[in-house]
Every structure is written in structure tokens, then in C-alpha cells.
Amino acid sequence: MNANIIKIRFNNYNLHGNASIAPIQWLELRYDIRYGWSRSRYAEESNTTTSLSHSGALHIFPIAALDLSLDYDHVRRQLADGTYKRMAFFNASAQYKFKRCILRLELDNLLNQRSYSYTVFDGINTYTFDYGLCGRTAMLSARVSL
């Protein structure tokens, strides 16, 4: 900038954890969490952003051929100091297997989330992107093995 060298320093830290358990034969639980922290410093400026996302799933097998599941995703990203975007998805499904056929009913985006936002922070500038999403959907599928 005007023949002056500007030094930029970045620090990025990420934590990730997950767990899967099956406390009883007909129940399975999964949880996943991620936390990120970024900081940049240049001249007399300093910027910090954070992100937190977690997801989980619950599978119930009342009989061997039936799998009922509910899963969710939740994301919180910082756009500016004290300003956050949040997004949450809930999905459900039921799958039944018999002989050579699998029937599956999927219900996606149960909260009817219509957009997804995220932020890219490059040290000097912050860019925010918004994407439109499909609303609630239901799909019934059949798969046959020959």
C-alpha cells in the first residue's frame, strides 16, 4: 500500500469431537461437534471470527428389518462482532428391508429452512454468501436387487 509493506498474521484453531454409542441392541446414537476460531492482525487492526457446528443422529431398530432415524445439523457462524448466522436442519427417514427389496421414506428439511449462509474471512475482508435451498421434501423410493 503506497510502497509500504503491511505484515499480516493469522491464527486458526479448530477442535473436533465425535461419539457413537449403541447402549442397547435396538438403539444407536451419534454426535459430532466442530469449533473454529480465526484471528488476523495487520497494522493496528485485529479481527476474530468463530464458528460452531454440531450434528447428531438417532437410529431405532424396533425389528431387524426396520430402521427409523432422525438426524439434525446446526451451524452458527460469526459474520461480525456480535452478529451470527444460524442454520438448522432436521431430517427423518424410515427404511424397511424385505427379501430383495428396500423401501425408504425420507422427509428432509423438516424446519423448511429456505437459505444457507456462510462467511469467508481472509484476514482483511469478510465475505458472506447466501444460498437458496429446497423447502421440505418427501421422497419414497424402492430398490430391488435382481
Image (cartoon, helix red, strand yellow):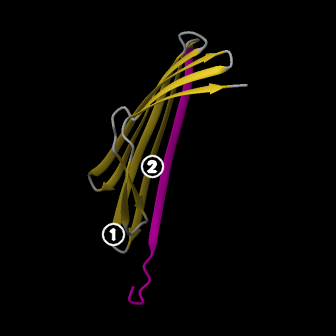
Q: What residue type is labelled 1?
A: Glu
Where does the N terminus fall, quadrant-wise? bottom left
Q: Please give the name of the residue rendered at 53% of the width and 33% of the height, measured from the top-left corner.
A: 18
Residue 5 falls within the magenta-colored stretch = yes
Range of magenta residues: 1-23
Residue 9 falls within the magenta-colored stretch = yes
Q: Please give the name of the residue rendered at 73% of the width and 25% of the height, measured from the top-left corner.
A: 146
Q: Which mark is residue 98?
A: none
Q: Quadrant of residue 141?
A: top right
Name the magenta segment's main secondary structure.
strand
Q: Is residue 34 left or right of residue 83?
A: right
Labels 1, 2: front one:
2
* As drawn, 106 above or below 63: below
- Sequence-first tag of 1 and 2: 2
Q: Which mark is residue 36?
A: 2
* As drawn, 4 above or below 22: below
**Which residue ends up furthest to the right in the rendered image?**
146
Q: What element carries label 2?
A: strand
Q: What residue type is labelled 2?
A: Gly
Residue 29 on image: x %, y %? 51, 23
Q: Residue 45 carries which label?
A: 1
